[in-house]
Every structure is written in C-alpha cells, then in structure tokens.
Image (cartoon, rainbow, N blue to C red):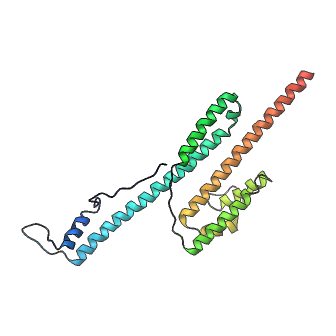
Amino acid sequence: MAQAKVGNAKNSGGGCGGCGEATQQAAAGQQPRGRFFRSTSMADRSSRLLECLDQLERRVEALRDAAASMEQEKETLLEMIHNIQNSQDMRNISEGEREELNLTAKRLMGRTITVEVSVETIRNPQQQESLLRATQMIDEIVNKLLDDLEDSKNRLISLYGACTSETPSGPVNQKFQSVVIGCAIEDQKKIKRRLETLLRNIDNSEKSILLLENQRKTSRQLCNNGKD
C-alpha cells in the first residue's frame, strides 16, 4: 500500500530563520558567540518566534492543499478508469480484446485504490450537522436514479446550482443552499465536486443509452430492408 511518510530532520529549523538554534541556546543558558553581545529582549524573542510560526502556518496550509489536490486526483483517476470500462468503444471491440483491456483497467483501479490520502476537516457541531443533512439530501436523489433518471438529473442540477457562484442554468434548491452555507468551506468544495461527478456520470449514461438505441434502430431498418 502506498503511503506518504514525513521524516523529521535532526535540525528542522529550515525556513524559520534559525529560531530553532536560538531556542536551544536559550534553553541551555548559553550566549551566542561574539566579542560584543547585547542581550535579546523578550519582545525580540517573541517577534522571532511569531515569525517562525507564521512561516510554519503557511507550510501547513500548503501541505493540506497539496494533499487535497492528491485526493481530488485520485477521485478523477478512478472516475476515468470506470468510464473507460463502461464506454461504448469497449463494447465495440472483440471479446478477447475487451477482456485484456478490462484486466488492465482493473489493475490500474487496484493500484489507484491503494493510495491513501486523507485530509481531515475541522468542524464545529453545526457544520457537522449541516454536512450530514447535505449528504442525506444528495443520497436521497441518488437512490432514485434508476427509477426516474430525468427527474433525478433535474433535481441534482438544482442542487448544483445552489453550490456555484455562476449563473445557474435552471432552478436553485434554496433549502439545499441554506444547508450548504452552514458547512465548512472544505466540505462545500467536496459537495460541489460530488455533484459535478454525478452529473457527468448521468450524461455519459444518457449518451450510452442513445448510442444503443440508434444501433437498435439501424439494425431494425437493415432487417426491414432485407425483407423488402
């Protein structure tokens, strides 16, 4: 299983302007070497430490952003592999070729799944409740996809319209919008991405159904022409 490991360097003061060394000297009761020495005031020490923490905060946020990007890339790769497995092109090749390509797709799927990326979102109780409610509203529609694809698609579009700053192409679910606003910013982005993925999958399904129907019509026409 692929894992990301972060090692602690022996001297990990990189990017902190030597604050680690100064802190160690202060703890040991040592004075910096030099012919002339002026004692460092508490305000100077505090300012230097604050600068170190500011730099570390930027690095922490950069780390979280990088991990979130990896998490999104994993989702994208899994979706692309799945789409290839269920594509019309895959149906229009020989059985032997299809079997070989499916084995390759499954291998890639398995390797992608072994990459574990997790960015925990800090939430207060209200944000946790809002996330749960938003997830339930989406799941409720997803569970009815097979019963009525067109209606489910329209309802998902109205949910997506509540998550985007762009002018929506259709009606906006105001109730869902108020729920999403109560979620943490990171959760809002994930909710929007999930809706985008669902709508893309529905579009791909509709295209596959349309292609299949066209093939059936063509076959029927050929049969009728043959009878004539």
Residue at image coords 70%, 57%: 156
* Quadrant in the picture for residue 139: bottom right
Q: Residue at x 60, y 43 (%)?
A: 80
Q: Residue at x 63, y 51 (%)?
A: 197
Rendered image quadrant of residue 19? bottom left
Q: Residue 18 at x, y = what percent?
A: 24, 63
The residue most toward the right is 228
Between 117 and 228, which is closer to the camera in this rendering? 117
Residue 60 shows up from this direction: yes
In this rendering, position of residue 202 left or right of residue 122: right
Q: Residue furthest front?
A: 1
Give the vertical position of 78 relative to 161 (above or below).
Answer: above
Q: Is residue 13 left or right of residue 90?
A: left
Asked if residue 164 can be seen in this view, the reply is no
Q: Give above or below for 28 relative to 7.
A: below
- Picture quadrant where residue 59 is located: bottom left
User: Which is more toward the observer, 12 or 177?
Assistant: 12
Give the percent coordinates (x, y) of residue 1: 49, 49
Residue found farthest to the left: 35
Position of residue 213 measured from the top left corner of the image (x, y, whole percent): 80, 37
Q: Quadrant of the C terminus?
A: top right
Compared with residue 164, is residue 104 higher up or lower down, i.e. above or below?
A: above
Total numbered labels placed on residues in the image: 0
